[in-house]
Amino acid sequence: MDRFEYIEARLFEGENYLKRDRNVKIYDGDDKTQFTDGEVVLTTHRILWGKPGDIPKGLVVLSLHLYYVFCIEEESGGVFGLGGPKRILLHLGPALPGKRPGPAVASPFHFVKFSFKDGIDQIFYKALTDAVTAKAWERSTSIASPISAASPNATPKPSVTPVNSKIRSGIVGIERSIEEQHRATDQSISVAFQDLRKLMEKAKDMVAISKNISTKIRDKQGDISEDDTVRFKAYLMSLGIDDPVTRDAFRSDSDYYLGLAQQISDMMIAVLMDCGGIMSLADVWCRVNRARGLELISPEDLLNACKLLQTIGAPMSLRKFPSGACVLQLNSHQDEEVARTTSEMIEENGYLTPVKLSQIANVSVLLARERLFTTERLGMACRDESIEGLAFYPNLFLREA
Amino acid sequence: MADITWPWQYNFPPFFTIQQHSETRAKQLEAWQQLISEYLKATKQSTIDIRETQNSVLFNNAEINRKLSQEAILTILEDMAKTGRAAPMDKSRNVWEVYWHSLDEWGNLVYNWACNNGMNNSVCTLFELREGENTVDQEFHGLDMSVLLKALKNLELKGKCELMEFDDSQGVKFF
């Protein structure tokens, strides 16, 4: 309600009459007001409300400038929404300073309602939405000199501009300034990235140059003093450019993985033999990375490399158990062999739990479990699930029968 | 309570877990079915209510602290049903009738007894069959009424006897 102003019912310059309606009540938000049974005139710039007959006479009436309106809704009257929409709900932007005094100084609501006793005239509603979207007040350079709506020939009274030039922009102005800010940020970001892109382009050259230089240094070991070499290397190091043997050195991923697979095969063979021929992929990953020291590989790279172990004819292969556990397994380490040794161990101990087997066979619990499952799958053990956990016994069912 | 000789499996913990390996599982189920039949025979029972099995000695070996779960019992009984050695009594499959002889076998037993005792073409009540002095040494003596009835109906279908209703009891006439 605080967006309304008291003003004489005259049209501004460039303002045009659009539509009128009667029996209109104003609500401040959800609250009733004293402004009932009035007449409404819609112009391209404003909504005027006055007692019947006041507006044509040019008396002081209520005026709501349309630039406050940013959303229009229809609201059905009555509890059950019967009888079609009766109210127009206008969501309003904040009141601008410098506006003329209105019926209310402050209002807790950010919307007002116009209640039409005879239902909303769809033509009126359409005209209102059109007027709000058209934003006629932006086009008119000056809305300072009002001309009388009732008698166009009356001398224009000097009147205070309802809004000064800065405020005139209203919501739109605010939106514009925000937009401008966005644009500025955008620009600065793209400038920043331009720099980065240039750096990236140059980085390749830098690497090439540094390699070039380092080979030259190596070739002419004698010509350049030890001191210089060290210093130069230090420079390169500080640039973060060494002589890395990484996946960049390979033309394609598959080459890289093949190389990696070969490396894994070479280094893991001894380890696997120590560990009973089988090792979970997580352990393998730790071992490999510990051996590499720097230039660590990702689990994914390891997995991809391990998948290629068979193609390079390595004496080990990647194995996925039905449970989903992945292991690296020596080729000599076949299921039958595993089952046989495991069943022997079960025999010796009477029964085995995965934990117990992992202690005896010096493997991880996960692998011990898989070994027991494998043994079971081959019918060489039988399970015992109880509250004490999972245990495996010699398969007496098959043996005794 | 029942003087039955427990098989070695009864003291073997894995016996109380349904096995995964198909061959092992088959052996295990077979052993269970035998045990159940024998136990019921020894205790003269013919129904199992799965909900009440958890404390039964049959499914609960306190010595080794192992218990056959209800699902496992259901698995075993369903397997028995496939060979006609058990049948569910209710839709929820909680109460099962277990036949330590198949219904056919029961029918034949009764019929043979009738023939051997010259009961052909004569009528005897079901009470006589179950509780009569003449049948004391027969296996079907004291047999569960519903099982006996089913066996006799089976026999009736083959035309070897005829069931008849008296005032408050049922009788059967052998041919």
Image (cartoon, helix red, strand yellow):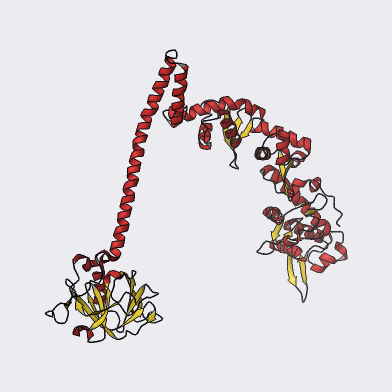
The image shows a total of numbered marks equal to 0
Q: Residue furthest top?
A: A222
The image quarter in which residue A290 lies: top right
Viewer-side residue, B62 vs A47: A47
Looking at the rendering, in which quadrant would you find the C terminus of chain A?
A: top right
Residue drawn at (50%, 34%), measured in percent from left and top?
A301
Q: Position of residue A34 (x, y in %)?
A: 34, 85
The image quarter in which residue A39 lies: bottom left
Vertical placement of A334 versus B163: above or below? Answer: above
As drawn, is B89 to the left or to the right of A43? right
Viewer-side residue, A47 vs B142: A47
Q: Position of residue A247 (x, y in %)?
A: 46, 30
Q: Position of residue B20 (x, y in %)?
A: 67, 45
Vertical placement of B10 versus A171: above or below? Answer: above
Q: Position of residue A344 (x, y in %)?
A: 74, 33
As drawn, is A277 to the left or to the right of A136? right
Residue drawn at (56%, 26%), measured in percent from left and top?
A265
Vertical placement of A234 versus B80: above or below? Answer: above
Q: Residue furthest left?
A: A153
Residue drawn at (30%, 58%), measured in percent from left and top?
A177
Viewer-side residue, B23 vs B131: B23
Looking at the rendering, in which quadrant would you find the N terminus of chain A?
A: bottom left
Residue A157 appears in the figure: yes
Vertical placement of A117 versus A278: above or below? Answer: below
Viewer-side residue, A41 vs A397: A41
Residue A242 appears in the figure: no
